[in-house]
Image (cartoon, rainbow, N blue to C red):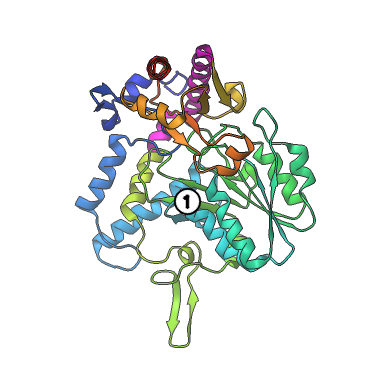
Amino acid sequence: MKNTPIEPESIRRDFPILGKNIRGKRLVYLDNAATTQKPSAVILAEKDFYENTNANIHRGIHSLSERATEAYEGVRTKTAAFLNVPDRRSVIFTRNATESINLVALSWARRHLEPGDEILLTMMEHHSNEVPWFMIAKETGARVVFAGILPDGTIDMTDFMSKLKPRTRLASFTHVSNVLGTINPVQEMTAAAHKAGAVVLVDGAQSVPYMPVDFTEIGADFLAFSAHKMLGPTGIGILCAKPGLLEKMEPFLGGGDMIREVRTDGATWADIPNKFEAGTPNIAGAVAFGSAIDYLSEVGMDRVREHEISITEYALDRLQSLGNLTIYGPAKAPDRGGVISFNDSVIHPHDLAQFLDSNGVAIRAGHHCAQPLHRFLNIPASARASFHIYTGRDDIDILTASITEARRYFHAR
């Protein structure tokens, strides 16, 4: 099984929602960069937790609490193994990738940046990897700097290298662009940033769900991603980090379970990872995320990536055959993730997305939380189709047929 191509039609049977109809048509779900659908195993894992294990973690000595703690902490260990994180204490559970990045901004950057320091980003970042740094820069007097991109949508490495200066204290960049699909050379970028003396955060929201990612191999100090983009539940994010950094960082939330001791004159903090997980977490969501990891591991992340390349190549060919479409990002499927943003020469992206919905086709339209990138591209918005293991060639055929139908409708008006 591990060496055979993925069969999307078979995979879909594991996802209840993909058997539903939208406006009388089979659901063709092509908005996976926003969130993925959930297999029955993940849905049932969360249900099973509430029916058979539900209790708070770490604090109780009764059986349910012990079982809940074991299940929750087991997923931390499983996550570390999935990404080759050497120390399971380096896996912090948050609400989403956005919160993971904010944790680094508030717990590391706030205490290490000074006026005149620089934060280096790229022009293809999601707002989640821009806005926290603007806020911290305003607070600390640091400056946000952007490395440019080339006309083909790839990172301008010459510009990136030139902007690594002695005052660059942090470099934060996406692994895979959620608009362009560009796969950045994060290992090379990380090594260069470290050589310049900067700490590195990699936004893995669009990479961890689709390809083998090795935290140790990348070499970054921080890696942020979300469970809901990798077949898991909403409300669970992950921050992987080097333990030496985490141990020196202050918590950004205070409350129960993150303390060692509280007195009337102050408090001391628990060891990592508990120091960064204040209050009752999304225990059931974490447990269900463990089932998502199991599902993807059973499929095999190499096969997930091979399918992404295959379906992206097919989609690029079919969309280009329509003509009068502008497609953004690298031209070849192996150079990009399973995200294709495009614009029709006549139909506004919002109108196109609404029309496609009438045929049961779900795509994204707008700026995809990447306004600076869209301004750089000189467009107000784009349409975006994004794929996962249940996306088949039949889905792409329905997409392109629906675009053709939309053209007949709008061009006739």
Q: Is residue 332 visible?
A: yes
Q: Is residue 175 visible?
A: no
Q: Residue at x 21, y 52 (%)?
A: 52
Q: Position of residue 268 (x, y in %)?
A: 50, 77
- Which residue, as the protein is rendered here, is positioned at the far top? 321
Q: Position of residue 172 (x, y in %)?
A: 63, 49
| Number of other residues with Cα within 10 Å of mark 1, as a class: few under 14, some 14 to 19, many 20 or more | many
Q: Is residue 140 above or below residue 90?
A: below
Is 207 in the magenta?
Answer: no
Query: Looking at the rendering, in which quadrant would you find the C terminus?
Result: top left
Q: Is residue 384 above or below residue 199?
A: above
Query: Looking at the rendering, in which quadrant would you find the N terminus?
Result: top left
Is 304 in the magenta?
Answer: yes
* Magenta-colored span: 294-323
Q: Pick whichever, 353 or 95, lies toward us.
A: 353
Where disc 1 sits, the SS reads strand
Q: Residue at x 73, y 49 (%)?
A: 193
Q: Residue at x 76, y 41 (%)?
A: 159
Count the marks: 1
Give left or right: position of 390 versus 243: left
User: Identity of the amino acid at label 1?
Assistant: Ile
Q: Position of residue 100 (x, y in %)?
A: 50, 54
Give left or right: position of 69 versus 190: left
Q: Which residue is mark 1?
A: 238
SS majority, magenta: helix
Give left or right: position of 221 versus 68: right
Q: Quadrant of residue 204?
A: top right
